[in-house]
Image (cartoon, rainbow, N blue to C red):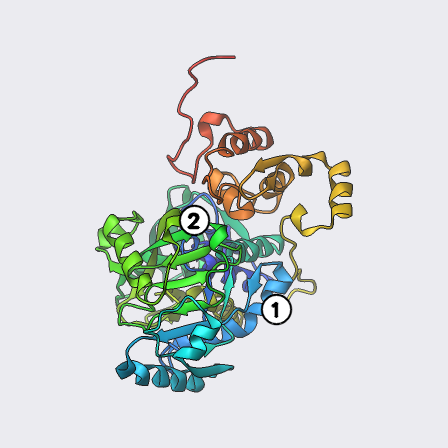
Amino acid sequence: MIYDVIIIGAGVTGSAVARELSRYNGNFLVLEKGEDVCSGTSKANSGIVHAGYDCKPGTMKARMNVRGNEMMTEICETLDIPFTRIGSLLVCTDPNNMDVLRKLYDQGISNGVKDMELISGDEARHLEPHLKENVCGALLAKTAGVICPFKLNIAMAENAFTNGVDFHFNTEVETIKFNKEENIFNLRTNNGEYKSHYIVNAAGVYADRFHNMVSAKKIHIVPRRGNYYLLDKNTGDYVSHVIFPTPTKFGKGVLVTPTVHGNTLVGPTAVDLPDNEKENTATTVFELAEVREKASDHFNDLPLRQVITSFAGLRAHEDGHDFILGPAADCPAFYDCAGIESPGLSSAPAIGEYMACMLRDDLKLTEKSEWIDRRRDILNPKDLSMEERNKLIKEHPEYGQIICRCESVTEGEIIDAIRRPLGARSLDGVKRRTRVGMGRCQSGFCSPRVMEIINRELGLPLTEITKSGGESKIVFERTKEG
């Protein structure tokens, strides 16, 4: 089979492009080397929807960020994704740097950002009482918000799949060759060969590798690592806005923010890694110490004794400091979505829209007479009234069986996560869809029960169930036959 478009990467950008392409008639495929969507860069980030004032005017970052922010409310309502516009504060602690706030405010106006305001240090402390006295001013951006990054990625992929897009997991692209005579790309993978008329390169930190296979005009992506702390839910009211420091050349700095689920997130660092470390998501004592030190510059009594986990993610930083979106100059059927770092999550819906419109025009695609735009998330019994919950449990007793005590996740939710479109096949897959194991004990009690449910639902032997695909097995062999 020859596909019209093959998308490399099932992260938030690739899934956004897939969803928008699914509006049209055609044969589309997403190839993902991981065992699930949202298994690379997209699984570890701040979960922030940025307002768009910190992007240089005229760049793709600025254009996509502002448009993506505008689209976010509707797409989250349509796809049933948790999202809250809580606003952000960019704080300044040096009176000599107040001109930076004014510059960013003016930049935001140039980018079309709405509802911004420059406020004094006292006004900032009125909004956020834990800010230190050294905060002398702040830029308030009311359109910023917090979102569940997993749900955004998963929801767009599920919706694309429902509308006919194919997804092949555990399929790593090894080489790409373009046959000029037939105008067809040949992709060799660990699972055989694929052919396509067009390619969308949404491969995160590996996007430069695939671009450079087909184009003489090379690009280079640096894997930039960031370490985070996640704090317990009992700190969820410590701040009510996303709090940024004054930015540096390495990014937005160490932020402190509530999450959409009620935790507090602190981080990230920004450490550039060599090209041979594109998988290095290790947390380090040095980077986590930097998170503590920099976050404490702006806050009194930062509750870092309430840390429940730390983690690290990688950003795909391109040497040109901007998103690369669109066809390669010397290979026009090869479309890049490269260098997608912050504000990539905020920009994803807009990138999907932008890329799909170009592909539609190039391939002369026609719109489907029926396109399913809506998707419902996993039913959460906690969102129901007591009467509705009792009725649900009576009809489906599995919703009365608590599996994860920290997050009160039921067996019914886990079953739904496994059975739904593009359902979970690993512990992390279930975790990202239901939050099972994301609480205080970090899977210490619930993981054996989750494995039993995966075993029962999928018929996978316990020795084949993984944490996150590949060789991340939990059980290696039986010590005793029952």
Residue drawn at (69%, 62%) of the image: 370
The picture places residue 189, in percent across and down from the top left corner, at 38, 46
The picture places residue 400, in percent across and down from the top left corner, at 68, 37
Q: Residue 39 has which mark?
A: 2
C-alpha span from label 2 to label 1: 25 Å
Q: Is residue 209 visible?
A: no
Sequence-first disc among 2 and 1? 2
The picture places residue 120, in percent across and down from the top left corner, at 41, 82
Q: Is residue 390 left or right of residue 139?
A: right
The picture places residue 148, in percent across and down from the top left corner, at 51, 57
Residue drawn at (58%, 40%) of the image: 418
- Seen in the picture, residue 476 relative to 327 is either above or below; the reply is above
Tell which of 248 and 189 is nearer to you.
248
Tell which of 418 and 181 is nearer to you.
418
Q: Which residue ends up furthest to the left in the rendered image? A: 274
Q: Is residue 31 left or right of residue 420?
A: left
Residue drawn at (65%, 39%) of the image: 412
Tell which of 390 and 303 is nearer to you.
303
Tell which of 383 and 170 is nearer to you.
383
Q: Is residue 42 left or right of residue 268?
A: right
Q: Residue 178 has which mark?
A: none
Residue kind at label 2, given as amino acid type: Ser
**Disc 2, SS:** loop
Residue 130, located in which quarter of the rendered image? bottom left
Q: Residues within 10 Å of mark 1 (few under 14, many from 20)?
A: few
Residue kind at label 1, given as amino acid type: Glu
Residue identifier under label 1: 74
Q: Is residue 339 visible?
A: yes
- Seen in the picture, residue 307 relative to 478 is either above or below; the reply is below
Residue 45, located in which quarter of the rendered image? bottom left
